[in-house]
Amino acid sequence: MMGFAKKYLGLAAFVAALTVAPSAWAGLGGPIFEIEACVNGQCYGAAAFYESDGQWVNGTFVWTLGEDTPIMSFDEQLQLGTLRANDTFVNFLEDPAVNLSFAVESGSAPGGTLFTIKSALLTFPAIMNAQGRASASFTVSDGIDDDGATLTPTLTGAYLAQYNGFVPGGADFTQLIPQMNAGPMGTFSLAQDYPGGGLYQNIAGSVSDMSTQISFTLSPNDLASGTSVFEIVPEPASVLFLIAGLVLVRRR
């Protein structure tokens, strides 16, 4: 009996290792971090960073913005906003997961600046019976105008997590963060998660890629920052069924 128990535990560990971390060959498609700025309906400012700007370390890709970066119009005549260093970074985990964080300051154009930030598309071997969860925490602060600050989502939520397709063309997992308002000289923060309570939401079919987007209009001369995490794992029950099936095969 002891021998069988050892075989069972060894097999369970082996299957768990294969199933919980199925994406040892994860890849990144497109810029790892891309930001576009629009004013008065015209999108003519952007910045992008690529895989060569960061590095993979033990299954995690790491990149952090090293210095404040102005988002200029394509003719370099107008500053539409500023991307702040240190609080702007992205991590991709082979497990898989996407951690996208940002800090921006809008320009002075009336009506504010529309910022759209995208992660790369993280691809990995298909996961059947997957589960996912996502969380986002944003802060909006009044700037030099002392007239309050407003962050208005482009979609239902300012944060969008998708799978099986590059944002915004993939399948929705969730949208988080509604409109946020800060008073004069004030700051307002909001955190949300889905499905909530640290739990996971089932995803039908198979999943082979994921990406996230942050998109909102920020009132003039104000500041916004935020961090987000989107992760996908196999359903625990599918792992147990696979283990049980392999155990029965071994016993025969």
Image: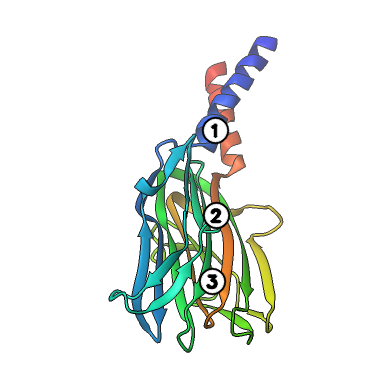
- Please give left or right for residue 8 compared with residue 49 in the image: right
User: Among all residues in the image, which is located at the extreme bottom?
Assistant: 110
Q: Would residue 252 be visible to someone looking at this image?
A: no
Instruction: Residue 230: give its label.
Output: 2
**Badge 2, how many Cα within 10 Å: few under 14, some, many 20+?**
many
- Looking at the image, what colour scheme do you see? rainbow
Q: Which quadrant: the C terminus?
A: top right
Give the Cα separation between the discs numbered 1 and 3.
Answer: 38 Å
The amino acid marked with disc number 1 is: Leu
Residue 185 x/y as whole percent? 68, 80
- Residue lying at 47% horizontally and 89% vertically, measured from the top left: 110
Instruction: Residue 242: give its label.
Output: 1
The amino acid marked with disc number 3 is: Ala
Say above or below: 46 vs 31. Answer: below
The amino acid marked with disc number 2 is: Phe
Residue 73 x/y as whole percent? 34, 76
Q: Which numbered disc, 1 or 3, marks the residue that appears first in the sequence? A: 3
Q: Report the residue marked by disc 3.
A: 158
Q: Which numbered disc, 2 or 3, marks the residue that appears first in the sequence? A: 3
Instruction: Report the mark closest to the observer, 1 or 3.
Output: 3
Q: Which numbered disc, 1 or 2, marks the residue that appears first in the sequence? A: 2
- Please give left or right for residue 57 compared with residue 50 in the image: right
